[in-house]
Amino acid sequence: MSCVALQNISMEYEVKEGLFTALRDVNIDIQEGEFVSILGQTGCGKSTLLKLISGILQPSRGTIRIRDKSLQEAKNDRSFGFVFQDPVLLPWQSALQNVMLPLEVVNYPKDQREPRARQLLEWVGLRDFAGYRPWEMSGGMRQRVSIARALAFDPPIILMDEPFSALDESTRASLHADLLRLWEQGKKTIVFVTHSISEAVYLSDRVVVMGARPGRVKHIVDIDLPRPRSIELTEHPEYLSYVRFLRGMLEEQREA
Amino acid sequence: MADGIATTGQLVEKKSQGFNEMVRRVWENYLPPAVFLAVVIVTWELAVRLLQVPAWLLPAPSDIYARFLTADTLWMHTRLTLIEAAVGFGISAVLGIISAAGIAHSKFLERGVYPYVIVSNSIPIVAIAPLLTIWFGYGLTPKIMIVALITFFPIVANTTRGLLSADHRIIEMMQSLNASRWQIFSRIQLPSALPYVLSAFKIAASLSLVGAVVGEFYGADHGLGYLVIFSASQLETDLLFVAIAVLAVTGVASFALFNWLEQRFTNWKA
């Protein structure tokens, strides 16, 4: 079943010099339970795309359907969990309270909020850190809290905007593993924006390659690698050929 | 048992370390200004005595202290000024935060109200004080109004900035969950604004004393401001110094209070 369907999406802004086209004729159809990465350089409109999917921005043209419903209906169904580039936690609240915030907003049964939040923190490996404040935690731990928060009320779609780009290599690797584990258990649809080719190949079922000026879809590549995936996969020749292929595609457009 | 003793020993050591640490901090932070003050006071005292400066021009610190001990109406004046400052401050804090919430939430209010907030800050308060005395007489009301006026701007301006400082991404996340405006305001924006509000209170605390004293310059027969005017007109310079010293101490104390609150409640800012 189609989960996120973007049809002929264009996005234009009025600027001083006239009309700036951020996105032109974008068509993407994401299936239920699929892990899709949106790959591109800065300025190709990939973050704009996430804002359109979640209804924070309205497209200039085109239609967006979420599980065959309008955006407003999807919003009423509370379809989306968000993970941003920075964790964006409330600094005056503990990890537990941060995870409970969306539960409060969606009116989750009062007596189940705390058990639910504790369970989520355990899933992301932070069982013993529920009482910590964000500034008492490392960058990786903070990002884990923000993933727990995104999963809190069990939304079917998780939108992730370069969530691991600010982390160091080994922290990123362990978060990749945890994200894949949670995704395989939870059957969520994940839309994952990144500028890292290897990350996109490692995590995704499909990679949408975006081009810049104007932002558009250049290619959609199926990543036909076995699951569950582990770090050994990154030495696999097929994995490497996907990486090479995508790098070629990104470089070709830089020259153009 | 041996373990128990070892632990106790460690505890004692830790405690004495804590004590030493405290002594060191007091030494480093409070000793230099105390020494400086002592030097100034001793020099002042010696200069006045050796040069035989008349008391109406510059009384010696010892004379000022003696006058402080015998000034039996001092507490009554101080209390009155503090009441004016506190009530005016309180009114201003409530109105200021409500106005800031309005300005932060509505473009219309921002355009309609904010210019007048700035105007209220631009008119020198000394120019408005006599007018308020004409309208409201000699009681507490005009002084409280002056205090409220003088503290209003820093509170509104800072609170508005604080409310708008909340991370827009978390607000968008809340909106995508159909959070109510009240939820976004009370759970995200208001706590984000707290450090700004407290730093505004620090400024406003000092300003509120200025406001109360200026108010008492015009048509008052009580309060520290009145005491200043009265003692100056009678050339009771020692009493004038007493009034100034009390004002200085209250000012510093109120600043310290809000400074402490700020550190206590916004430790997450660090």
Image (cartoon, rainbow, N blue to C red):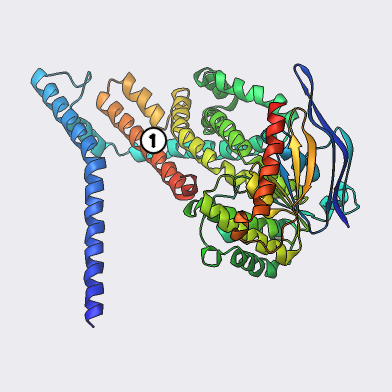
Q: Is residue A235 above or below residue A243?
A: below
**Residue B57 horizontal/vertical position (percent):** 22, 18
Q: Residue at x 11, y 19 (%)?
A: B52
**Residue B28 horizontal/vertical position (percent):** 23, 42
Which of A1/B150 is in front? A1
Q: Residue furthest front?
A: A237
Q: Is residue A241 above or below residue B196?
A: below
**Residue A255 horizontal/vertical position (percent):** 69, 27
Q: Chain of mark 1?
A: B
Q: Locate the C terminus of chain A and report the quarter of the image it occupies.
A: top right
Q: Residue at x 71, y 63 (%)?
A: A227
Q: Locate the N terminus of chain A and report the quarter of the image it occupies.
A: bottom right
Q: Is residue A146 above or below residue B67?
A: below
Which of B67/B246 is in front? B246
B211 sits left or right of B105 in the view: left
Which of B224/A134 is in front? A134
The residue labelled by disc 1 is B251
**Residue A110 horizontal/vertical position (percent):** 70, 66
Within 10 Å of disc 1 (Cα), the crowding (few <14, some 14-19, many 20+) is some
Q: Is residue B138 above or below residue B166?
A: above
B154 sits left or right of A241 in the view: left
The amino acid sitting under disc 1 is Gly
